[in-house]
Structure formats: C-alpha cells, structure tokens
Amino acid sequence: MRYEALEGTTAKRVIKMYKNVVAGLIMKGYPYRKSWTHREH
C-alpha cells in the first residue's frame, strides 16, 4: 500500500485520507480489516 495524493472533490479527498490512514496503520503493523472500508463502493 502507498499514500495517495489528496486531490479531486471533497468526497474523494475524504476517501483518500481514510485510505492513507489505513495504509499508515498497516505500515505500523496493525492488521487490515475489510470491515473498516465497508462503506466504500
């Protein structure tokens, strides 16, 4: 996983910020859970 640039509409920026947080947690050793992203389509 990698960090994504924060660009686009506000909604897309929020999704990318969320993905960046998840990517950061994974890099720190936290397990990834699909339940965290169940609202994304």
Image: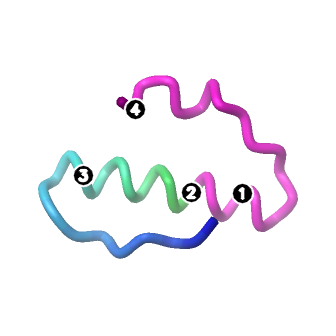
Callout 1: SS: helix
| Residue 19 percent coordinates (x, y) | 50, 53
Which is more foreground, mark 4 or mark 2?
4
Q: Which residues are magenta?
A: 22-41
Q: Residues within 10 Å of mark 3 (few under 14, many from 20)?
A: few
Mark 4, residue position: 40
Labels 4 and 3 touching (C-beta < 8 A): no
Residue at image x 35%, y 75%?
Answer: 5
Q: Amino acid at mark 1?
A: Leu
Q: Residues within 10 Å of mark 4 (few under 14, many from 20)?
A: few
Which is more foreground, mark 1 or mark 4?
4
Callout 4: SS: loop
| Residue 41 percent coordinates (x, y) | 36, 30
Callout 3: SS: helix
Q: From the viewer's perspective, is 32 left or right of 3?
A: right
Residue 37 vertical position relative to residue 3 in the rendered view, above or below: above
Q: Amino acid at mark 2?
A: Val
Mark 2, residue position: 21
Q: Choose the circle earlier in sequence order: 4 or 3.
A: 3
Labels 1 and 4 touching (C-beta < 8 A): no
Labels 1 and 3 touching (C-beta < 8 A): no
Q: From the viewer's perspective, is 39 left or right of 9?
A: right
Mark 3, residue position: 12
Q: Choose the circle earlier in sequence order: 3 or 2.
A: 3
Mark 1, residue position: 25
Label 1 – label 3 distance at C-alpha: 20 Å
The N terminus is located in which quarter? bottom right
Q: Amino acid at mark 4?
A: Glu
| Residue 39 percent coordinates (x, y) | 42, 25
Label 1 – label 4 distance at C-alpha: 18 Å
Labels 1 and 2 touching (C-beta < 8 A): yes
Callout 2: SS: helix
